[in-house]
Image (cartoon, rainbow, N blue to C red):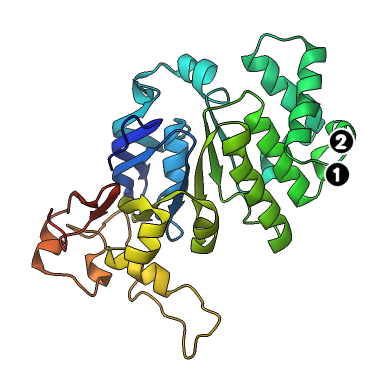
Amino acid sequence: MSDEKPLLKIRDLRTYFYTYKGVVKALEGVNLRIGTNELLGLVGETGCGKTVTGLSILRLIDPPGKIIGGEIVFGGEDLLKLRENEMSERIRGKKISMVFQEPRSSLNPTYTVGSQISEAIRLHQRVDKREATRRAVSILRQTGMPDPERIAGEYPHELSGGMAQRAMIAMALSCDPELLIADEPTSSLDVTIEAQILELIKDLITKFRTSVLLITHDLGIVAETCDKVAVMYAGNVIEYGDVRDIFKRHRHPYTEGLLNAVPKLKMSGELYTIKGTVPNLITPPTGCRFHPRCPEARKECSEFKPSDVEVEPGHSVSCFLYKG
């Protein structure tokens, strides 16, 4: 992981949830970086910690959850050391924005789309109501919204799923953030609209010079869209690198399993599945969390947690098969 000055660098991030059944160790030592003008895919099975990672970056973990350790260095400062008012005034919505899976649940049903976007603009920029409204229509136009003047005056329930997601992206981009976190932004959309939204997200990097953290479980989306990819398993990033390297020269047995489980056009027989089940994060396995399901597991895997090893420049893996 050798980028010189990443926009965002996460070191040993640990986020726990304190429930009646026990402590859920959702993130246990996550290491991650995102470069300037880069699209990074964060991929893994449901429940592996992808969304929690995104929420942790913005410090939006609500009780009973708590970030208990690590560093989230953004633009040279550790976000975990900032006061809450600094996060809300300087970071959230201004420098880092987030787009969620279901856009309608994130839009206020009692306000028009345009008023919600202009409110976000006025919150972080010193402009009057008229200028904020003009900018809201402009940003809707830049996200490819048809007839943006009309859409600005409509309510969320009047929009289709794709249009609502474009509105959410417009709101996220309204203050020209340096980083956009997109959490499964196409999961509720049909295939045609999904392709349009993904193309829009790729355009953001050149049009707005915004870096993107794309959270997804779909390796096909990662292959088509991203520059780099981080593979998560049970609260850890277990492999990180350039998309082509990960797909052609992946190293971790879990990454191998994920790629083998992708349906192929000319396949015969049953679809490959990774043996076993995702671990309970209240009582996770000792050592490497993947070792109970790993075909390459050895004694040390159950006793010690592997450290990140750079197997090639910019390509790291957390596995005892590679010891540097």
Residue at disc 1, secondary structure? helix
| Residue name at image x 63 percent, y 42 percent | 203
Mark carried by residue 11 = none
* Amino acid type at image mark 1: Glu
Residue density around tag 1, few if under 14, some if 14–19, many if 20 or more, within 10 Å? few
Asked if residue 217 shows in the view, the reply is no
Residues under numbered marks 1 and 2 in contact, where contact means CB atoms less than 8 Å apart: yes
Measuring from the top left, give residue 233's x and y in whole percent.
34, 57
Residue 27 lies in what quarter of the image? top left
Q: Quadrant of the N terminus?
A: top left
Front in this rendered view, residue 113 or 65: 113
Residue 221 lies in what quarter of the image? bottom right
Q: Is residue 184 above or below residue 259?
A: above
Q: Does residue 225 appear left or right of residue 149 in this picture?
A: left
Front in this rendered view, residue 143 or 172: 143
- CA gap, disc 1 and disc 2: 6 Å
| Residue name at image x 67 percent, y 26 percent | 174
| Residue name at image x 47 percent, y 31 percent | 58
Mark carried by residue 154 = 2
Measuring from the top left, give residue 167's x and y in whole percent.
73, 38
Q: Is residue 308 above or below residue 4?
A: below
Mark carried by residue 158 = 1
Measuring from the top left, give residue 100's x and y in whole percent.
60, 43
Q: Is residue 110 above or below residue 18?
A: above
